[in-house]
Amino acid sequence: MFTPKALTTFIGAAALTALPLMGLSEGETPAITVPDAEMRLPLEDLRNFAKVFEQIRQGYIEEVDDSTLLEYAIKGMLQGLDPHSSYLDRESFDDLQANTTGEFAGLGIEVGIQDEHITVVTPMDDTPAARAGLKAGDVILRLSGKSMKGVSLDEAVERMRGPKGSSVTMTIARKGYKEPFQVTIKRDTVRVRSVRSELLDEGYGYLRISQFQLDTGGDMAREIKKLQKKGELKGLVIDLRNNPGGVLQSSVEVADAFLDEGLVVYTEGRNESANLKYSAEPGDLTDGAPLVVLINEGSASAAEIVAGALQDHRRAVVMGTDSFGKGSVQTVIPINNERAIKLTTALYFTPKGRSIQAQGITPDIVVERVKVTRVKPGSRTTEADLAGHLGNGNGGEERNAEDRKREKEGRENWLDRDNQIFEALNVLKGLNLYAQRDREAPARFARAD
């Protein structure tokens, strides 16, 4: 539910930042004015519209009420403009709000389809599903008595959502259990975080941003602090692959977190209110640590703003493949308490004036996503394996072939999991090594004198 005083700007799949409403406030009476010659509506075209409207009313095989026909007309008018302008009914707006805030009433499970069955991918932490004991791999056979076999993923998700406090009974098949069993879960507010982090290697962090929600900037700052508590952060991979965009202000906050100053993005449109500039404030959360930003053809809109800003400021190396190329801004304009339109009102530009629209961000280093087949090494012998070998000389610990094999098995093998992350990690290590040598150079020269 929203009020006519709300107005939201979009640049991706989700709402962006609240702006003053351009138009009437609640309770105002519109002033009646006579439009200028150029502003007058085309009467002949309006007559054609009225004729088509009447033909549909009288001749269409099924009766359609006038209100529905006019709603269809509005939808068609917006869809004819561009792929991102659209009409929002109550349900569409509710879905948009859920994507923007990352909050919805539901169970808190990620699901997929396996062998035509809806299967639990993972229960989210601290959600009704997790508290009820659902596990990854559980097959949902029935939901509130209705079979789930053959149900589409979208329909399954829709069935699982519902009002906070309402309950749903699932019939679950679990590996190791002879018979299916039932679980009753009470729906609650589920918070989906758009940011997660982990260490790729000692000192090198990984930050995954799946979309830009209202709280993404703050969530990212907290994840960076978690990484820093584990030790010095020597470099960071920011993964924006398959990120469809979202909240404009959040994309600015994310880019700003790694910049001390300068323009982040600016927008240009027909109306003066659409011409905006967003700049970075002092303060780099990583203290200048090297950055690699990963993008691909699924990185769009707000994700492209972040990649473009960090690339233009030479703050990060952008790796991966060309991004999607959505460089337009959408504004949500309420029509009444239950309906709104999402209208393209501006284009956005990177700090150096590049338009992303229908072009995208080109990475500094192109790395395709591929499956790497490792060449298995044969039996190895090292100096430490030879009988009668000399000691290290400096007291260093010896490492024979078996020791090295165990160390390798103990490390996460990113080459097998994700070759693009593996390459990004290697670039970070190279940048860090180069910077370290650069810092040590004056000291070496001083010793030489």
Image (cartoon, rainbow, N blue to C red):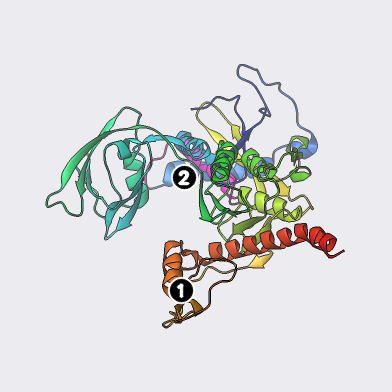
User: Is 358 within the magenta?
Assistant: no
Q: Position of residue 403 (x, y in %)?
A: 43, 69
**Kind of residue sitting beneath label 1:** Asn
Please tell me whether mark 1 sits on a helix, a strand or a loop. Answer: loop
Q: Is residue 402 left or right of residue 307?
A: left
Q: Nearer the viewer, residue 360 or 412?
A: 412
User: Is 81 within the magenta?
Assistant: yes
Callout 2 touching callout 1 (CB < 8 Å): no
Q: Which residues are magenta?
A: 61-86
Residue displayed at 17% across by 54% down: 176
**Kind of residue sitting beneath label 2:** Ile
Q: Is residue 409 left or right of residue 327?
A: left
Q: Nearer the viewer, residue 30 or 206?
A: 206
Residue at the right extreme, as displayed? 449
Please tell me whether mark 2 sits on a helix, a strand or a loop. Answer: helix
Q: CA distance from mark 2 to mark 1?
A: 83 Å
Residue displayed at 77% across by 49% down: 351
Q: Quadrant of the C terminus?
A: bottom right
**In front of the other: label 2 or label 1?**
1
Q: Position of residue 225 (x, y in %)?
A: 57, 40
Considering only vertical position in the picture, is 342 above or below 377?
A: above
Find disc 1 in the rendering and name its residue: 400
Residue displayed at 69% across by 64% down: 364
- One can see residue 327 in this view: no
Q: Position of residue 102 (x, y in %)?
A: 48, 38
Considering only vertical position in the picture, is 63 above or below 116?
A: above
In the rendered image, which quarter is residue 5 located in? Answer: top right
In the rendered image, which quarter is residue 42 located in? Answer: top right
Considering only vertical position in the picture, is 250 above or below 389?
A: above
Q: Is residue 399 left or right of residue 224?
A: left
Find disc 2 in the rendering and name its residue: 56
Q: Nearer the viewer, residue 427 or 393?
A: 393
